[in-house]
Amino acid sequence: MINFNVPPYIGKEIDFIKEAIQNHKISGDGEFTKKCTKILEQITKANKILLTTSCTHALEMAAILADINEGDEVIMPSFTFVSTADAFVLRGAKIVFVDIRPDTMNIDENIIEKAITKRTKAIVPVHYAGVGCEMDKINDIAIKNNLLVIEDAAQGLMAYYKDKPLGAIGDFGCYSFHETKNYSMGEGGAITIKNKDMAELAEIIREKGTNRSKFFRGEIDKYTWVNYGSSYLPSELNAAYLYAQIQNPEIINNDRLNSWNYYFEKLSELKEDKKIELPTIPEYCRHNAHMFYIKTKNLEERTELINYLKKHEIYAVFHYIPLHSAPAGRKFGRFFAQDIYTTQESERLLRLPMYYGLKREDQNKIIKSIKNFYCKKT
């Protein structure tokens, strides 16, 4: 069976985890957390970055830092994971879903401004598949309307918009280090903070509402409870696992790009024959090969192809049932204007196996199986 995903493993992860154990420091904010933070700040050029227990928690922290409250509205695409919306719903916000672009599957930047009301507090662009949203226009809209921009860059580490790292362009950015992501710590994430004045508050929120971080830096002689917060701090064991991969992030990045480019090259024939559609990467974007997907003619054909691949021991999956169509989406949000592309395109999209270390012979089997499927349909 060719799995859809295999969590990344470079080879040094176990050594670093053992080192953390031997150092008698396995809770958070130890040496491996500090090392990871330093590298991530170098990659993203963010003013401040903090490791978190998940991207979900990074988004929750961003919602708190953005002072999202009951009755506020937050604009985002419906084609995203539930965490994007959950973080703001927990604060009492109403989610305003807008349509996506069919080329990148990202939020349609040309609709955002029309969806703004006097209650709108923030825009949440989601960089789907590590391909950047049109951030210049989104930031311009935000500045014009005095709104915050919170990037859901769960899939975006090592990807760029006009040479700007995804996740470090808006006011806040959120990354995921889940086992399905390019770089993993099992469960984990990170938040970037542009405003330096918000950095101390972010540390307090992350440390259960205490100023414990300042205490550990020797800035105060004792720490205490100073605000509300929660436990958003990952363990050193998780950070040690991540550190092995981001020491030299190009190892994983180049491997994935090679696999992505091979898929694109070998499946282009089916694209030219108008059997399938392949991903679009705008000129202003540098992606990170987070995923490779194809688009079938419709939902029925996608279902047939999934079943066909499964019979040939290949596990391919679809991605996201649009949030506005879910029970919670209807309860906590509304869709602005028309759903022209969100549902239609989500029903056509099929993700192929994509991970660090994907074998070329496995890719060839996947490609051959897809071609055989369409050959039989001719």
Image: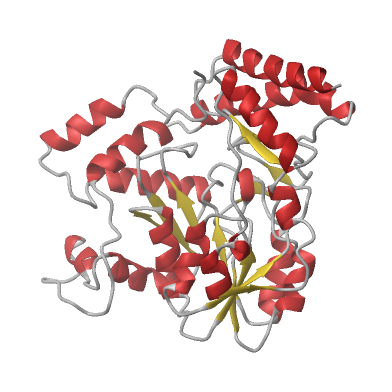
Where does the image place residue 278, in percent across and percent down from the top left? 76, 35
Residue at horizontal 57%, vertical 24%?
Answer: 310
Asked if residue 263 is positioned above or below residue 67 in the image, the reply reads: above
Residue at the right extreme of this rendering: 273
Q: In which quarter of the image is residue 226?
A: bottom left
Where does the image place residue 61, in percent across and percent down from the top left? 40, 67
Residue at horizontal 28%, vertical 37%?
Answer: 240
Say whether residue 162 is visible.
no
What number of labels is visible? 0
Where does the image place residue 14, in percent across and percent down from the top left? 25, 27
Quarter that holds the C terminus: top right
Residue at the top extreme of this rendering: 361
Asked if residue 295 is positioned above or below residue 230 in the image, the reply reads: above
Give left or right: position of 300 versus 201: right
Say whether residue 107 is visible.
yes
Asked if residue 74 is positioned above or below residue 203 in the image, the reply reads: below
Give left or right: position of 33 versus 3: left
Q: How is the image coloured?
A: secondary structure
Relative depth, front residue between 27 and 86 = 86
Q: Quadrant of residue 39?
A: top left
Where does the image place residue 286, in percent across and percent down from the top left? 68, 41
Give left or right: position of 378 versus 142: right
Relative depth, front residue between 193 and 154 = 154
Residue at horizontal 41%, vertical 66%?
Answer: 60
Asked if residue 354 is positioned above or below residue 373 in the image, the reply reads: below
